[in-house]
Amino acid sequence: MMRLARLAELSRRLRAVLHERPELALAFSQAFERHDEQALGRAFEGLQRETPAVRRDAEAAILEWLFGSGSDVDPANMVREPTPTRH
């Protein structure tokens, strides 16, 4: 099984932790929706200007989205893929 990491889920997680910084959450959401690398860079620059606590929360949300834990993996985001073989 392979886990799919969806940008919509990352956007949701960032909105949750950045609820007191809606403009920053919106910047991330719009960058994801548009697949805009430059806008994403600007959103991360904005995150760097935030307090250490806000940065830690956002970074934790990103890492949790990327690597997840067994308890938060949605079966809808799991895809059965053949195991790659070495030649």
Image: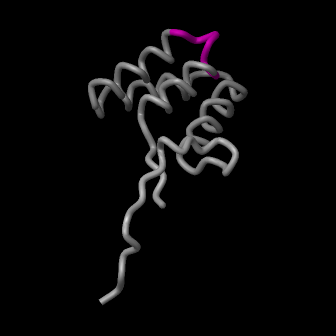
Residue 84: image location, x then y, percent: 36, 75
Per the picture, the main secondary structure of the magenta-coloured stretch is loop
Residue 74 part of the magenta segment: no
Q: How many marks?
A: 0
Question: What percent of the width, then of the height, locates residue 72?
Answer: 65, 41
Apparent side of residue 38 relative to residue 56 in the rendered image (left or right): left
Residue located at (38% from left, 63% from top)? 81
Res. 31 image quadrant: top left
Indicate the quadrant containing the C terminus: top left, top right, bottom left or bottom right. bottom left
Residue 78 is situated, as x and y percent measured from the top left of the image, at 48, 50
Residue at the spot x=27%, y=25% of the render? 34
Q: Which residues are magenta?
A: 17-22
Residue pictured at 56% horizontal, 38% vertical: 62
Q: Residue furthest bottom?
A: 87
Tell me: residue 32, above or below residue 72.
above
Expressed as whole percent of the image width and height from the top left, the position of residue 47 reads: 54, 26
> Front-most of 9 and 41?
9
- Taking the image as shown, residue 18 lies to the left or right of residue 38, namely right
Identify the colour scheme used.
Answer: one colour
Q: Which image quadrant is residue 60 in?
A: top right
